[in-house]
Image (cartoon, grey):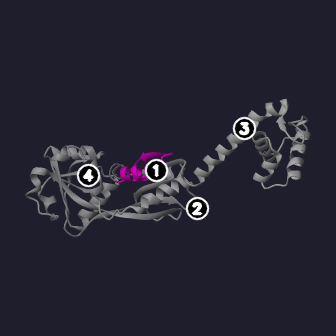
């Protein structure tokens, strides 16, 4: 073999081998018959064998041609399949998306987005990584996730933030106490009932502490919890009330025993959106998922 044959010449060989007609192959390939004959002759010279036995009436594969045929079928089939899959990858129909999200977002908002996306992109793998805000932004910078769904970051030039919704803080209480609390609730309720809070270093606790300060409310926490499920359990046991972003409600335990009330002004909320690194191009699959995410109406959390 003097040199490796080109894929185009192998494809022409394959067409002739299947049709056993130079004239028909030339017509289908939009070539002149002399040009096709030259291509096959050069292929035979490259391989050092005769591929076809032919006369004025018949074309037949030689023994060498018959040996070459399954190899060419496999090569062209693998090539075509690889580029079909690559085309699907470029179109966002294949690939992997790694989404980082706050636990409340992962529990409440993302399931419906993922369900819709999988209907139109069944061959895209979606990986969901839950974390708190600081961990999400570290993962984003370390390229462990494609983008993060979290609260708005402090001014960071390297991060682009696209807002999705305002996540209002609500009063969370035992269902039997809800009838005695107006809707919307006055902030004074927190002076009268024990407060169950998140741990002081959490973003939720910093949000609620700031809200109490604006409302001129002093309410020491009776319990400080690292998990929202613990807050829910304590409320369900009748041990107090809490102030939480509305998106966190699905993470509370014993939901049948828990109710919530909107708050009177001054209203408190956190802005949730998508953060991505500036200058980092998303894969087509990740961009397609992000487009689906941003298409939904998040004006109200239910």
Residue 212 in sight from this viewpoint: yes
Q: Earlier in the sequence, mark 2 or mark 1?
A: 1
At 44% from the left and 49% from the top, the residue drawn is: 118
Q: Position of residue 252 (x, y in %)?
A: 25, 47
Residue labelled with disc 4: 249
Local secondary structure at mark 2: loop
Whole-number angstrom distance, CA of label 2 to CA of label 3: 43 Å
In magenta, the rendered stretch is: 109-134
Contact between labelled residues 1 and 3, with CB atoms less than 8 Å apart? no
Residue labelled with disc 1: 99
At 20% from the left and 67% from the top, the residue drawn is: 216
- Foreground mark, 2 or 1, reads 1
Contact between labelled residues 3 and 2, with CB atoms less than 8 Å apart? no
Contact between labelled residues 3 and 4, with CB atoms less than 8 Å apart? no
Residue labelled with disc 2: 279
Q: Does the magenta stretch include residue 227?
A: no
Whole-number angstrom distance, CA of label 4 to CA of label 3: 58 Å
Q: Where is residue 188 in the image (x, y as percent from the top left)?
A: 14, 63
The N terminus - image quarter: top right
């Amino acid at each position: 073999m003097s040199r490796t044959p080109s894929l185009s010449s192998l494809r022409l060989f394959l067409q002739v081998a299947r049709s056993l007609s130079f004239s028909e192959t030339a017509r289908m390939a939009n070539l002149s018959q002399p040009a096709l004959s030259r291509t096959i002759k050069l292929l035979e010279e490259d391989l050092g064998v005769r591929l076809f036995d032919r006369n004025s009436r018949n074309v037949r594969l030689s023994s060498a041609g018959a040996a070459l045929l399954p190899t060419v079928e496999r090569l062209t089939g693998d090539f075509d399949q690889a580029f079909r899959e690559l085309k699907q990858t470029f179109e966002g129909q294949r690939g992997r998306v790694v989404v980082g999200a706050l636990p409340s977002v992962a529990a409440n908002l993302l399931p419906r987005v993922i369900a819709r996306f999988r209907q139109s992109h069944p061959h895209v793998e979606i990986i969901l990584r839950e974390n708190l805000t600081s961990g999400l932004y570290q993962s984003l910078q370390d390229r462990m996730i494609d983008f993060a769904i979290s609260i708005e970051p402090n001014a960071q030039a390297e991060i682009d933030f696209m807002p999705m919704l305002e996540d209002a803080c609500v009063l969370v209480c035992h269902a039997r106490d809800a009838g005695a609390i107006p809707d919307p609730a006055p902030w004074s309720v927190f002076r009268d009932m024990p407060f169950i809070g998140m741990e002081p270093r959490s973003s939720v606790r910093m949000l609620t502490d700031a809200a109490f300060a604006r409302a001129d409310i002093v309410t020491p926490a009776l319990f400080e919890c690292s998990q929202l499920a613990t807050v829910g359990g304590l409320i369900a046991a009748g041990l107090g009330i809490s102030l939480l972003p509305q998106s966190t409600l699905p993470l509370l335990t014993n939901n049948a025993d828990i109710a919530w009330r909107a708050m009177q002004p001054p209203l408190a909320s956190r802005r949730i959106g998508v953060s991505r690194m500036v200058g980092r191009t998303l894969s087509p699959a990740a961009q397609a998922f992000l487009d689906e995410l941003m298409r939904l109406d998040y004006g109200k959390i239910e």
